Image: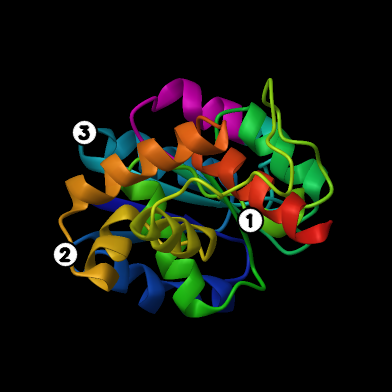
Amino acid sequence: MYFIVADDHGMVREALVPFIQRVDPLAVILQASTFEESLALATQHADALTLVILDFKMPGMLGEAGVTTMRQRFPNTKIVVLSGTASRAEALSMLKNGADGFIPKSLNGASMVNALRLVLSGEPFFPSMLFQDDEPDIAATPTGGEVGANLSPLERDVIALLVQGLSNRDIAQRLTLQEVTIKKRLSSAYRKLGVSTRLQAVQVLNMVRQG
């Protein structure tokens, strides 16, 4: 299994390696300083390529164009974008163009590890703080007094950990439960909240907290 971390600053890449190793100690971590280098490495290891981490502003990336190219060539690989500015417009653009995650470089180590684990488990990661002022893209949003009122105690605990950015596996470990149980509780909680994805659930809860 191969992971690629691509950033034009060597110190940033070296700083990320220990956190990536915590995600999967057995993965081979390859480094690139430009988009072209990351694309060449991805092509070379395409059969075992699991994760590509791309700096939003490194040479050759061209923002969303780099994500689109990587997604088209490697549809089964998880793609995460790193950003030093971490604006909402950037995050939405990456989400629209096929990224599985968008991670601000200011994110602390533990949160970054959780974010990468979340992406590798099949769930997208986009920081809730970037969407706090947006209306969730859902047909019907419960009012503040209704949100969470009919969640079971376990569903409340699961949702609380989800908002912290934990993956299903981490939530299961924290609550000493099977991961399949967490998935079932999340599905039930989503239904009760009137949402269909993790991102929408976080948006709804943040909106309620604000007002």
Question: Can you identify the residue that label 3 sits on?
Answer: 47
Amino acid type at mark 2: Leu
Q: Are marks 3 and 2 in contact (CB under 8 Å)?
A: no
Give the CA separation, mark 3 to mark 2.
Answer: 16 Å
Tell me residue 143's x, y (percent): 74, 40
Give the CA separation, mark 1 to mark 2.
Answer: 27 Å
Is label 3 or label 2 in front?
Answer: 2
- Residue 62 visible in rendering: no
Amino acid type at mark 1: Pro
State which tag comes first along the sequence, 3 or 2.
2
In percent of the image, x 27 and y 40: which residue is there? 184
Quarter the C terminus occupies: bottom right
Q: Secondary structure at mark 1?
A: loop
Q: Residues within 10 Å of mark 1 (few under 14, many from 20)?
A: many
Question: Can you identify the residue that label 2 sits on?
Answer: 26
Amino acid type at mark 3: Asp
Is 173 included in the stretch rendered in magenta?
Answer: no
- Relative placement, left or right, of 161 versus 172 is right
**What label does residue 67 carry, if any?**
none
Tell me residue 82's x, y (percent): 61, 57
Is label 3 or label 1 in front?
Answer: 1
In the rendered view, tell whether residue 109 sits above or below residue 208. below
Q: Secondary structure at mark 3?
A: helix
Q: Secondary structure at mark 2?
A: loop
Give the CA separation, mark 3 to mark 1.
Answer: 30 Å
State which tag comes first along the sequence, 1 or 2.
2
For the record, the magenta segment spans: 67-78
Question: Can you identify the residue that label 1 sits on?
Answer: 127
Tell me residue 119's x, y (percent): 41, 48
